Image (cartoon, rainbow, N blue to C red):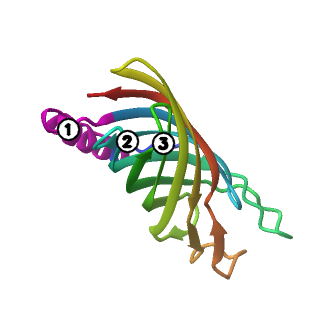
C-alpha cells in the first residue's frame, strides 16, 4: 500500500492544533478513528481519520480521512484490472445530537485524489453519518455508519490501451469507529 505522509501529516497536524487551541472556548470533541468505505466502482478503501466537533450537542465539525488504495478496478473487456487510487477527504459539516447516545452529521467534502496510472482531478462531494457513542464524560467509544457521494474522472493520457476518460463513482457506504475525547 502507498501512504503519503507528505499529504496526510500536515492536514492532521493542522486539525490537532486548531482543536487544542479551541479547548478553553468550547465544549467540543476530538475523534480519532479507523475508516472503511465500500465504493461503487473502485471497491473497498480502508484508512484513518481525525474529526473535531465544536459541541457535543449541536455545532459544526471538520475533519480529514485518508483512504488508501482502492484497487478493484474493472475495465470491462480489457485484461487489465489493477490500478490504485488513494484519496483524502476533507469534511466540513454540522453535528446534531439526538440524545446522549445517538447523533447524526452531514456536510460537504473536498476529495484529493492520487492515482498510480492516469490523472484524477480533485472533486467536491457530500457525506452523512448516523452514529452512537458509549463511555464516560471525557473519553468515549463511537461507531458510525457513513454515506459518501463523489464522482471522479481518470484521464489516461500516457496509457495506450485506454483512450477515453474513465468516470468512476467513488462514493458509497462505510463505517467509522474509534475514540472520542470530549472537552
- The image quarter in which residue 13 lies: top left
- Sequence-wise, the earlier of marks 1 and 2 is 1
Residue 151: which numbered mark, if any? none
In the rendered image, the quadrant that contains the C terminus is: top left
In three-dimensional space, the C-alpha distance between marks 3 and 2, rounded to whole angstroms, equals 19 Å
Residue bearing the label numbered 1: 26
Task: Report crowding for label 3: few under 14, some 14 to 19, many 20 or more residues within 10 A (C-alpha).
Answer: some
> Within 10 angstroms of label 2, few (less than 14), some, or many (20 or more) residues?
many
Residue visible at 68% across and 76% down in the picture: 160
Instruction: Report the disc number at residue 98.
Output: 3
Pointer 1 and pointer 2: residues touching (CB < 8 Å)?
no
Residue 9, x across and y down, in percent: 32, 41
- The one nearer the camera, 146 or 10, is 146
**Residue assigned mark 2:** 51
Taking the spot 28% from the left edge, 37% from the top edge, the residue there is: 28
Compared with 54, 112 (above or below) is: below
Label located before the other in sequence (3 or 2): 2
Query: In what element is the residue under mark 1?
Result: loop
In this rendering, is residue 69 above or below 162? above
Amino acid at each position: 500500500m502507498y501512504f503519503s505522509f507528505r499529504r496526510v501529516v500536515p492536514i492532521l497536524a493542522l486539525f490537532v492544533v486548531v482543536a487544542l487551541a479551541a479547548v478553553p472556548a468550547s465544549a467540543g470533541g476530538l475523534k480519532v478513528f479507523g475508516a472503511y468505505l465500500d465504493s461503487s466502482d473502485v471497491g473497498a478503501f480502508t484508512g484513518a481519520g481525525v474529526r473535531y466537533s465544536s459541541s457535543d450537542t449541536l455545532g459544526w465539525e471538520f475533519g480529514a480521512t485518508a483512504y488508501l488504495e482502492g484497487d478493484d478496478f474493472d475495465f470491462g473487456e480489457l485484461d487489465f484490472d489493477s490500478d490504485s487510487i488513494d484519496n483524502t477527504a476533507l469534511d466540513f459539516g454540522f453535528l446534531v445530537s439526538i440524545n446522549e447516545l445517538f447523533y447524526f452529521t452531514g456536510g460537504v467534502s473536498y476529495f484529493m485524489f492520487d492515482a498510480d496510472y492516469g490523472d484524477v482531478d480533485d472533486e467536491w462531494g457530500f457525506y452523512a453519518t448516523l452514529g452512537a457513542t458509549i463511555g464516560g464524560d471525557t473519553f468515549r467509544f463511537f461507531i458510525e455508519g457513513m454515506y459518501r457521494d463523489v464522482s471522479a474522472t481518470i484521464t489516461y493520457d500516457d496509457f495506450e490501451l485506454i483512450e477515453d476518460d474513465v468516470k468512476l463513482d467513488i462514493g458509497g457506504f462505510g463505517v467509522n469507529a474509534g475514540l472520542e475525547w470530549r472537552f
